[in-house]
Image: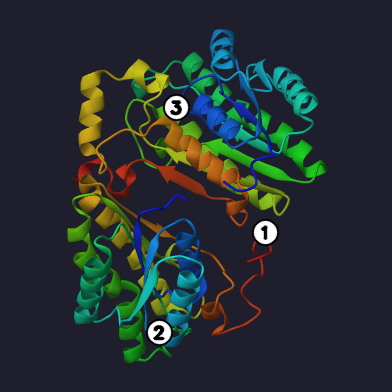
Amino acid sequence: MQLAGKVALITGGASGIGRATALLFAREGAAIVLADVNADAARRVADEIVKTGGRAFFEPVDVTRAADCRRLVERAIRELGRIDILFNNAGIIRRATVLDLSEDDWDRVMAVNVKSIYLLSREVIPHMQKAGGTIVNMASGWGLAGGAKAAVYCASKGAVVLLTKAMAIDHGPQNIRVNCICPGATLTPLAWIPMQGETTNGIPCRDS
Amino acid sequence: MRGLKAKRVLITGGASGIGAATAARFLDEGSAVCVLDRDAQALEKTLHELPNLAAALAADVSNLTQVRVAFAEAVRLMGSVDVLVNNAGISIRHSFLDITPDEWDKVIAVNLTGLFYVAQTAARHMMEHGGGVILQTASTNGVMGYPFYADYNATKAGVIELTKSMALELAPKVRVCAVAPGYVLTPMQRAEYTDEMLAEVNRKIPLRRHAQPEEIAALFAFLASDDAQNITGHVYTCDGGETAGGLASR
């Protein structure tokens, strides 16, 4: 039990990497706060954790709205007293070049993938300042190298990589560690949205 | 960490600092561990502190014959080698203008040529015996420029490129990763930094401290474990946030 007594807030916790992380953290003893726009699926994850003896609740949240983020963190502090881990995992993808991307889609991807990290971190960090804490942001291999027909996604994940480094410098002295994860092709619901079958070609280990 | 219990691990430069801490960590995880080092005295001390070691092998990684003999001995003693921690390295603090050809050759011989000798010997064995994991000690000095260690920095940049190229050629049988420590409190560091220098460095690191050797060992344990089975060809940094911005960013 490496996370006994800790509280972890996970956005996009209803599916994919967020769900797998929530279940693993719960097994390691953490209480889990799940935030997602997909209420039904997130509630099922919370139920699964509670059923196996863990502690979890779900809050329907749009992480691009400041008021939602504030409400989420206030509830977490009210019910669990602390937040040790913030996993800014929520993300979306649009498979388009800049020529076929709508302005609304540009704004939406940047809001979910980047702005949400700012909105939530500014609510959570004040609560971490006494005991320290750790923030993990979800970036991507496409935040380090370009990919085809994913212009705004690449832009957003590149932004996450440098936002992470800037936050690490700012909040390290308060013993808040900030890191990001750059997964490659991962078999999640998000990976199946577009272009099935293209994802694993040319990857050295040939599985995902 | 998952999957380390039955693993057979060889660690070069294993008699001090990060190497010795890594040996202790893998022993804790239930692995069989051989350390290799050219410092016979330090080997004896390590064997005394870690009596569960399968062996403490005396060898100079810059000597190919010694590497082959020691590697064969590790295989004989443990049955095979599943994980190599290719960690032996040296550094000399000197200004670029003063580096002598001998000093240059010495640093290259251990940090790059020696690392290659061990890596190739291990990789040939692993490709024929069901695969494995090769982890190599690079450095944040292989990513950013730092004064007074130009030769060392060049070797560590070499380790990073070697790691990536090996990963591509040896996949999917053998995973190859590098670890890039920043400032770590090791004998190598204590030998070249005064307390005042250490404090000055700590002030510029976001987390305000050097890493402990055990924290680098933890990264090696993770990368060798079954939890890291989809990770190859990359460099993992543990530096208290130092290179997130570079020293001038504060």
Spot occupied by residue A195 in the image (x, y as percentages of width and height): 59, 83
Q: Quadrant of residue A33?
A: bottom left
B121 to the left or right of B96: right
Of all chains, the one bearing label 1 is: A
Q: CA distance from mark 3 to mark 1?
A: 34 Å
Spot occupied by residue B66 in the image (x, y as percentages of width and height): 71, 17
Spot occupied by residue A138 in the image (x, y as percentages of width and height): 41, 66
Residue at numbered disc 3: B151
Residue at numbered disc 2: A98
Give the crowd class for mark 2: few <14, some 14-19, many >=20 residues within 10 Å: few
Q: CA distance from mark 2 to mark 1?
A: 31 Å
The residue located at (66%, 43%) in the rendering is B133
Numbered badge on residue A205: 1
Amino acid type, mark 2: Val
Amino acid type, mark 3: Asp
Please state which of the two labelled residues, at mark 3 or mark 1, is closer to the viewer.
1
Give the crowd class for mark 1: few <14, some 14-19, many >=20 residues within 10 Å: some
B213 to the left or right of B196: right
Of all chains, the one bearing label 2 is: A
